Image: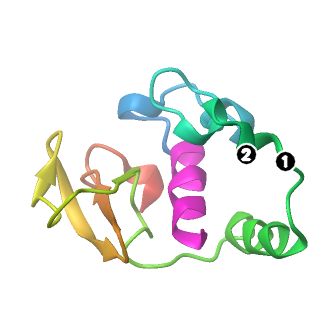
């Protein structure tokens, strides 16, 4: 959850590539296309647990976790993580998810 949070905060900070004019977490979560798939699932609208709120606050306050530190994208592949995904470099894998970063030249705000 912390790493997905990193991706979300990075998207708000980025103002580049797919995330131009995204200025807050709500816009980022509900962005179409490109927002979080969970928003179309019923479980997304359940009350947040205290544990989840604590984790979200850590990320909002600036904690970063590799491989999502500078990532703007992630997905869960059926096999190994590809080296690139839509021309973005793989920064690593955590459990089942692969994370992808823009270049510092394309998105300096996330570095």
Q: What is the magenta segment's predominant secondary structure?
A: helix
* Residue furthest to the top: 32
Check residue 77 in the rendering and tell me which mark sits there, or answer none. none
Give above or below for 3 relative to 21. Answer: below
Q: Residues within 10 Å of mark 2 (few under 14, many from 20)?
A: few
Check residue 43 in the rendering and tell me which mark sits there, or answer none. 2
Task: Please identify the quarter of the rendering in which residue 62 is found.
Answer: bottom right
Which residue is depicted at the point 45% across and 56% down? 110
Check residue 46 in the rendering and tell me which mark sits there, or answer none. 1
Q: Residues within 10 Å of mark 1 (few under 14, many from 20)?
A: few
In the rendered image, residue 6 lying in the magenta stretch gets the answer: yes
Where residue 6 sits: x, y (%)? 55, 63
- The answer, for residue 36, to whether it is visible in the render is no
Pick the residue in front: 42 or 80.
42
Where residue 5 sits: x, y (%)? 60, 61
Give above or below for 74 relative to 92. Answer: above
Write the start and end of the magenta stretch as one range: 1-13
Q: Is residue 14 left or right of residue 22?
A: left
Q: Please, what secondary structure does the residue beneath circle 2 have?
A: helix
Give above or below for 8 relative to 61. Answer: above
Q: Is residue 30 left or right of residue 42?
A: left
Which residue is depicted at the point 61% across and 36% down? 28
Pick the residue in front: 106 or 67.
67
Q: Do the CB atoms of the residues marked 1 and 2 lie less than 8 Å apart?
A: yes
Which residue is depicted at the point 33% across and 62% down? 99
């Amino acid at each position: 959850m912390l790493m997905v949070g990193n991706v979300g905060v990075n998207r708000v900070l980025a103002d580049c590539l797919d995330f131009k004019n995204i200025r807050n977490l709500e816009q980022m979560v509900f962005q179409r296309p490109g927002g979080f798939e969970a928003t179309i699932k019923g479980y997304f609208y359940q009350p947040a647990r205290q544990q989840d709120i604590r984790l979200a606050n850590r990320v909002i306050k600036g904690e970063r976790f590799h491989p999502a530190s500078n990532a703007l994208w992630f997905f869960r592949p059926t096999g190994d993580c590809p080296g690139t995904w839509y021309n973005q470099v793989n920064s690593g894998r955590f459990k089942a998810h692969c994370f992808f970063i823009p270049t510092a030249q394309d998105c300096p705000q996330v570095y």
